[in-house]
Amino acid sequence: MHPKVSVVIPTYNCAQYITEAIESVLNQTYKDIEIIVVDDGSTDNTKEILLTYIEEGLIQYIFQNNQGPGSARNTGIKESQGEFIAFLDADDTIESTSVNERVEMLKKYKEISLVFTDFFVLDNSKINCQREPILKKNHFLNKVRKVIKLIDQESVVFSKDFYYFYLRLSPRPICMPTVMLRKRCVEEYGLFDTTFEIGEDNEYWMRIIRNNYVGFINKPLGCYHHYRSYLTKNIELYAKDELRLQKQVFSRMIEDIKNQIKSSWYIKNIIGNSYFNLGYFYYKNNNFLESQKAIIKSIKYLNINIKTMKVLFLSIFRIPRDKLSFFVKNKDTSQKP
């Protein structure tokens, strides 16, 4: 008999963290779970650390050559037997009732294809996850109140228009350790796009939520470890993949809502700001030519404004930031997914 839930855990050189992630799944109140660990070419002692779990049949362990987290998740999805699929990165954890509460919501609301929850963020300055939930702290439900279809205590169902709000939200509300989706979503929408090095998760969520109702549990049931994720520390790589995602989504939205000029303006503004962030990143690192290129592209979406002209001027005349830092009073608005 197949398990009800498959939890897919990709890992790459996370030997020091992965047992914590696995234990958080084994300690779930819901027990009808299979755990699929996909080792994406680790060169540390990951397999040795997992040997006991493998021998006791607590996890299914798959090794593959390094291809990135999207590919590792895809491998896990292909091996999954569950009706529902949940994702957990090797350096994150979930609360003990997380699987059960997400399963119950998917069973109760047949129209939703994906459910996610609030979450905690753990960084270097904090010892544990007992703190204010991120989405609650950022007034998430107030920001999306126009697309709420129904609320039943802590369960929220969003209409299909939630898709048009997603890229505008900061922080992005759908966080990997909180997601659970129906297996049929894979059959309908395919797998993660492995051409994204960073942000392949947001592209996948956007693909699924575009024409579907989405469920949300207004409780923090996952813990995202901000300081452990080495990929998202690469600001340039993240900004480029983020721009690619935004352009894809923008194109889809133009097809969907040709008569909704306001929504189109919002997305153009998001893309323009992302180009500006990339240009400002290059400027701070004295890469003046690339800064000029990115800022000129930002003007295409934002039109000319004070902040773009300041950075463009400094880049053209190759004035280093440390020589004239007072001239550009701009915060680095690059965001982690």
Image (spheres, rainbow, N blue to C red):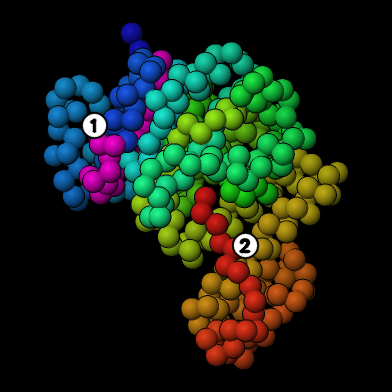
Give the numbered dot on residue 230: none
Residue at the location (51% across, 33% down)?
A: 220
Residue 179, how many percent across, how many down? 49, 32
Residue 329 vs residue 311, the one in the foreground: 329
Residue 108, how many percent across, how many down? 59, 13
Residue 115 vs residue 78, the one in the foreground: 115
Name the residue that disc number 2 marks. Answer: 274
The crowd level at tag 1 (other Cα within 10 Å; few <14, some 14-19, many 20+) is: some
**Up-down relation of residue 262 to residue 269 (above or below):** above
Q: Is residue 5 magenta?
A: yes
> What is the three-letter code of the residue carrying label 2?
Ser
Q: Could you tell me if residue 73 is visible in this image?
A: no
Residue 267, how many percent across, how many down? 72, 53
- Residue range corresponding to the magenta coloring: 4-20
Question: Residue 292 occupies which quadrant of the picture?
Answer: bottom right
Q: Is residue 36 left or right of residue 288?
A: left
Residue at the location (57% across, 67% down)?
A: 332
> What is the three-letter code of the residue carrying label 1?
Tyr
Name the residue that disc number 1 marks. Answer: 61
Mark 1 and mark 2 lie on one chain; the one further toward the N terminus is: 1
Residue 227 vs residue 188, the one in the foreground: 227
Q: Is residue 49 left or right of residue 321?
A: left
Q: Is residue 43 left or right of residue 132?
A: left
Residue at the location (52% across, 86% down)?
A: 322
